[in-house]
Image (cartoon, rainbow, N blue to C red):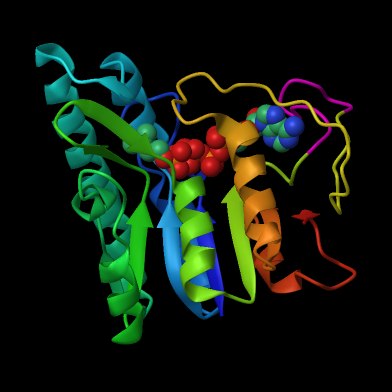
Amino acid sequence: MIVVKIGGSLITDKRRYRTFRRSAAEKIISVISGENPAIIVHGGGSFGHIASKRYELPGPLTERNAIGGALVKNDMADLNNRIVSILIRHGIRAVGISPFTLFNGDTMDYSPVTRTVKSGFVPVIYGDFYTDGKYGGIISGDDLMIEACRLEKPEKAIFLSDVDGVFDRDPKKYRNAKLISKYEKHELNFNTVKNDVTGGMDRKFRSMLQCRALGIKTYLINGNYPERMRDTGSENFMGTEF
Ligand code: ATP
Ligand code: IP8
């Protein structure tokens, strides 16, 4: 049993507002559906980050940016709906759950997620806007992966993004960046991504360490080659293992 996060950089074009990459999503989901997922998480990409940035979220709510929070919530529900529809077509009993509705004004209450798993369905949770009415927060799918690991104690936590793994520096900026196949306290450098309000690879890296610290085998894999998910633990594995 696995928990998996589909990165927003795979299923959307992060440079263009609300651009869905349907064929990439179909390809990834066709592999995930054979891997016994307990919980599926996805990121925001251009359905989440662009409007969040435009409306200065996360941050204190004002007359101006509260409407932005509603917009982000709606755009993310739309992206979630598209992912859930594809999952259902692939035979997964997927049920979208918005973290906005899990927030109880103080913390996130994940009991609807555990109840969904217990009833034999697969929760599909995602980076989302949430609020207590005063502050507009943005929860990242990377943080939700830590919770998914705590709740379900899966055999593996798989993070899918648009790079071959964690490199010593951003492979999109430095052609000679080195892939870290097995992370052992290497010195790393992270480049912040434009249009990203949740901290990019730096945040993801820290979330992956936390999943590992819970005793879960954790991997970062290039979701443009989702079949690599099947090779975790083997000699042929291409990606980063924690
Ligand atoms: P989202 O947050 O929308 O769900 P995502 O989870 O797919 O997206 P990003 O936050 O976009 O992932 O992070 C992936 C990006 O991180 C890569 O495209 C890469 O350019 C960048 N990056 C920066 N530093 C590094 C590094 N040291 N190793 C690997 N990737 C890096
Ligand atoms: O892309 C952030 O989630 P992430 C979602 O997983 C929003 O970091 C709404 C920006």
- Quarter of the picture containing the C terminus is bottom right
> Is 179 or 86 nearer to us in this picture?
179
- Above or below: residue 154 compared with residue 227: below
Would you say 193 lies left or right of 64 here?
Answer: right
- Above or below: residue 21 compared with residue 216: above
Q: Is residue 207 visible?
A: yes
Q: Residue at x 60, y 21 (%)?
A: 192
Give the tally of numbered discs: 0
What segment carries the magenta color?
167-176
Magenta residues: mostly which secondary structure?
loop
Q: Residue at x 32, y 63 (%)?
A: 110
- Above or below: residue 144 compared with residue 185: below
Residue 16 image point, x, y percent: 38, 25
Residue 189 image point, x, y percent: 77, 26
Would you say 95 lies left or right of 169 here?
Answer: left
- Above or below: residue 204 compared with residue 121: above
Would you say 158 lies left or right of 117 here?
Answer: right
Residue 162 image point, x, y percent: 61, 42
> Is 138 or 89 nearer to us in this picture?
138
Q: Residue at x 86, y 54 (%)?
A: 182
- Quarter of the picture containing the N terminus is bottom right
Residue farthest to the front, as pictured: 106
Residue 28 image point, x, y percent: 52, 61
* Residue 172: in magenta span: yes
Q: Is residue 162 visible?
A: no
Ligand 1 located in image quadrant: top right
> Is 227 or 72 nearer to us in this picture?
72
Instruction: Give the image quarter of residue 93.
Output: bottom left
